[in-house]
């Protein structure tokens, strides 16, 4: 379970990875072992959660659409 206050952003994977900077960000997060794939299904979004430092962040790769995740956040599904 992710705490809502830890969420930095919810991003569409297809739209975001068009840009070089975002691709590099995800690549570096994977290289630093900061990514967590929440499902074996085709990923649609990623959620960046802050930690104590930039290296302590977590990037969750999710099969859910950004609209679904945003709606769940607004409805309080995140603690």
Image (spheres, grey):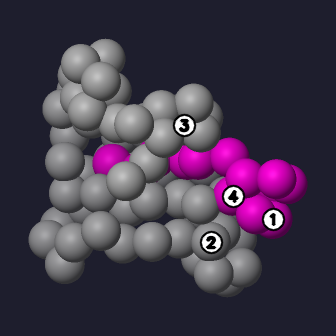
Mark yes or no: residue 51 visible.
yes
Q: Which residue is mark 1?
A: 55
Label ID, residue 74: none
Q: Which residue is mark 3?
A: 7
Earlier residue among tags 2 and 4: 2
Q: Does 25 sit above or below residue 69?
A: below
Which residue is located at x 53 percent, y 71 percent? 35
* Cβ–Cβ under 8 Å for marks 2 and 1: yes
- Which type of secondary structure does the marked residue at label 1 adopt? helix
Which residue is located at x 45 percent, y 71 percent? 36
* Cβ–Cβ under 8 Å for marks 1 and 4: yes
* Cβ–Cβ under 8 Å for marks 2 and 4: yes
Q: Is residue 79 left or right of residue 63?
A: right
Total numbered labels: 4
- Which type of secondary structure does the marked residue at label 4 adopt? loop
* Mark 1 surroundings: few (<14), some (14-19) or many (≥20) residues within 10 A: few
- Which type of secondary structure does the marked residue at label 2 adopt? loop
Q: CA distance from mark 2 to mark 3?
A: 14 Å
Residue range corresponding to the magenta coloring: 45-57
Q: Is residue 66 left or right of residue 54?
A: left
Q: Is residue 79 left or right of residue 57?
A: left
In the foreground, 10 or 25: 10
Whether residue 66 appears in magenta in the rendering, the answer is no
Looking at the rendering, which quadrant does residue 37 occupy? bottom left
Q: Which residue is mark 2?
A: 34
Q: CA distance from mark 1 to mark 4?
A: 6 Å
Label ID, residue 57: 4
Earlier residue among tags 3 and 1: 3
């Amino acid at each position: 379970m992710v705490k809502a206050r830890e969420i930095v952003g919810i991003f569409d994977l297809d739209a975001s990875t068009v840009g070089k900077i975002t691709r590099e960000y995800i690549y570096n997060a994977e290289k630093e072992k900061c990514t967590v794939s929440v499902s074996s299904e085709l990923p649609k979004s990623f959620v960046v959660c802050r930690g104590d430092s930039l290296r302590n962040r977590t990037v969750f790769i999710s099969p859910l659409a950004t609209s679904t995740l945003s709606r769940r956040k607004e409805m309080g599904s995140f603690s």
